Image (tube, rainbow, N blue to C red):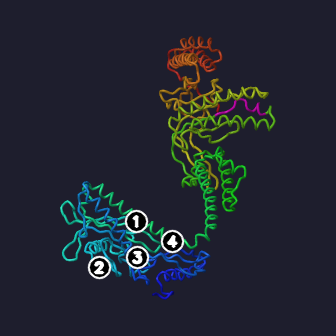
Amino acid sequence: EFPLGEHPAFTVQMNARADARLQPGGEGSVPAKPLWSPLYRNWIDGRLGVALTEPIAPCGNYSCLEGVIQAFVTVGYVSFNCEQALGKLRSLLGGATYDVAIDNTNSSIFVVGHKLRNVTQQGMLIGAAQAMITTETYAERFSSAIVSAASRALLLRFERWDAEEMQQQQQTFTFRLGSGSAVELGCNPKVMTDCLQIGTRSVMLDEETRWLVVVVLPADAFGRPGQIAEQNVREQVKRISADLDRYMDEARLAGVGIFVAALVSCIAVAMALSFLVSRRLGILANLIRKLGDLDFARDSREFEQLRRGTRSRIKEVGNLQDSFCRLSKAIEAFAKFVPDSVVQSIVRDDPGARHLHVFRRRVTIMFSDIKDFTAISESLCEHDLLRLLTRYFSAMTHVVERHEGVVAEILGDGLLVYWNAPGDVEDHCGKACLAALAQQRELADLNQLLAQEGWDFPELIIRIGLHTGDVLSGNIGSEVKMKFGCIGDPVNTASRLEGLCKLYGVSILCSEATFSGLPPNTPALCRGLDIVQVKGKSKPMGIYEVLCDKRYTSEEEAGALVSRGARYEAALQLFQQARFKEAIAGLEKLLEETPHDKAAARLLSRAYESESMGIEGRSFNYVSRIVEK
């Protein structure tokens, strides 16, 4: 019989209490918890075993430790479980599928204490199949030849019973008995009939106690059929571990059973609080993940509840909900000033989002402007002007975003839009042209709606210029202020093309670079207008009018546009070949059908002027030099 102060079950908790006193917060800062004792003999019947100890501490920590409840587990009980598992393996491997005979000379299942508080007991047997353990015995010295040989092989491979590699994962390897008591690691079961295989799994009982379950079988059992047998052995190891886990759970339940009645109400309250906190935090985590993708989840019930002011009764969770709502509003407002992809990079803490940097990209750029906006603005009060611009920019921005464009800046009454920056956009030339046509259709609907509401000013007309070229794209500015943008001549060229719309009397102009980037099956119809040299540019470029989207145009109307466009392009080619008389004849006939075609009228005027100069059939400079911006 042990004196109370020396009983192993009591000593392990008293040692934990002594360790708690050394902590910065003392005994009261360390929760009392179940711990496993070292091997010892039960003073009642003298049987060898270990105990799961449950501290009696009403305050929940070691400052009020009053006693210990123990659940004693004998090595005989562990050995019985090992024998049961080995019996199942023996039946399985002895069947027709495997046809492998195993006995106590070539197989065993045993349990070793491989990480213990009492380091002197590390490597001692906790239980073994087909064996009677009556004294504290190190596994490598056990009387069973197969158990001692397997233990020596494990020590030869890993050097220590508490090796980290054995604690972290399952291990399998082969060995064979050499001469005397020696073991040899690594053998080929196809060549050596005495080749054995070891499988291990580490089972954690508490933070400082781990048992190692070891299975030893003939290595050829894994080869007939190899994959099936190996899988079954691993399942057996898992079942043994599950049995041990289940027994530990039963032992814990037995140890704390005395306190269940007193703790039921406390546990119920704790579970309710845990459910409330975890549920609210889970909802917040989901909303924050969506926020990282700029999905503000306005349609979700949880977001609507937060927006209306519904908060958790738990103060800390409520504070987190308030912080999330403020963050969501701030990011949503921020996204109205900066492209979405840039905001996403900042929210996700991408390193490049916080520094000045540029990289070369080929982008399509759109400049748009409202015709005669100065006169319109002078006719409206400030409030009505703001309402009008808000409705106009909202409609145009939605169109751009549907076509994967990024609104970089709002310039008074105009828009600067990029495609293929900052993110990659496939077929950015085609999407930019279709977006420009969609803006014209959206503007027609907006004009009709404004007229129905009684707005007293001429209908809004916009001009759009499109150009594609290589720019430097990224964060530009100073060390204290920066913005996303594109630098390069293509930006200025797009602005010049928007200005040329007025000269040629068209709504949408694109450069030859953008036109060349359109895919063969594009629904956008275009006609070549001219070859121009804009102010500030030394090289001429072709310009094209973007006419319509075939998907939203009747076949008859689309056919007429294609026909008139082809006739105009034929007249332009005749003009460039100095065949002015033929060009004039074609243009006059075209203008009879479409008298408002300002581009055709301008080309006709140039043809008359060139004919009067007497250069018919001679080489001349047919490039239009534009001197105005």
- Mark 4 surroundings within 10 Å by alpha-carbon count, few (fewer than 14), some (14 through 19), many (20 or more): some
For the residues labelled 1 and 2, say whether their Cβ atoms are less than 8 Å apart.
Answer: no
In this rendered view, identify the residue nearer to me: 190 or 136.
136
Q: Which mark is residue 254?
A: 4
Sequence-wise, the earlier of marks 4 and 2 is 2
Give the vertical position of 123 relative to 285 (above or below): below
Residue located beneath label 1 in the image: 241
Residue located beneath label 3 in the image: 74
Secondary structure of the residue carrying tag 2 is helix
Give the vertical position of 385 relative to 298 (above or below): above
Sequence-wise, the earlier of marks 3 and 4 is 3
Q: CA distance from mark 1 to mark 2?
A: 24 Å
In this rendered view, identify the residue nearer to me: 454 or 285.
285
**Mark 4 or mark 2, whichever is nearer to me:** 4
| Three-letter amino acid code at the position of disc 2 | Arg
Q: CA distance from mark 3 to mark 1?
A: 17 Å
Q: Give the residues in magenta.
A: 368-377
Sequence-wise, the earlier of marks 1 and 4 is 1
